[in-house]
């Protein structure tokens, strides 16, 4: 049930997505290769969004194709969102966004 709701929410988010040139993208917007610090009230976690073949949970690298990765795309530092975890819904805060490396495409999806 949680996964079905997450997929529905993701589809809603993607329906309003825009394609933006990299040079026009503010540096604090989450995208491919971003390193993102998230706070959920009782925990902080810093992750990097990577291509699926580079994902590594031990190094906190998550795929941009994972549900969490896709949902974070387009949010900025200071934004809040609700996320359904198996043990309940939590409000997440985007604490910090840092760009790591150079994107492989000339435009990004937000």
Image (cartoon, rainbow, N blue to C red):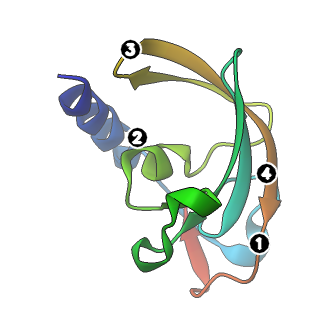
Callout 3 secondary element: loop
Spatial CA distance of label 4 from label 2 is: 20 Å
Q: In this figure, which residue is indicated by the disc labeled 1?
A: 100
Q: Position of residue 90 (x, y in %)?
A: 53, 15
The quadrant of the picture occupied by the N terminus is top left
Horizontally, residue 72 falls left or right of residue 40, namely left
Q: In this figure, which residue is indicated by the disc labeled 2?
A: 13
Q: Position of residue 83 (x, y in %)?
A: 47, 25
Q: Nearer the viewer, mark 2 or mark 1?
A: 1
Query: Relative to 77, is 59 above or below?
Result: below
Q: Position of residue 34 (x, y in %)?
A: 69, 62
Spatial CA distance of label 2 from label 1 is: 24 Å
Callout 4 secondary element: strand
Callout 1 secondary element: loop
Q: In this figure, which residue is indicated by the disc labeled 3?
A: 87
- Of the numbered discs 4 and 2, the one sitting upstream in the chain is 2
Which of these two is toward me, 90 or 28? 90
C-beta proximity under 8 Å, tags 2 and 1: no
- Residue 31, can we see it? no
Name the mark on residue 97: 4
Horizontally, residue 63 falls left or right of residue 95, namely left
């Amino acid at each position: 049930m949680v996964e079905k709701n997450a997929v529905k929410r993701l589809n809603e988010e993607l329906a309003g997505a825009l394609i933006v040139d990299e040079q026009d993208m503010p540096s604090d917007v989450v995208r491919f290769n971003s390193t993102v610090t998230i706070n959920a009230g009782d925990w902080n976690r810093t992750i990097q969004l990577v291509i699926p073949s580079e994902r590594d949970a031990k190094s906190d690298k998550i795929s941009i194709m994972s549900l969490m990765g896709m949902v974070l795309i387009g949010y900025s530092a200071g934004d809040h969102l609700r996320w359904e975890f198996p043990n309940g819904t939590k409000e997440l805060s985007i604490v910090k966004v840092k760009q790591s490396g150079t994107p492989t495409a000339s435009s990004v999806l937000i």
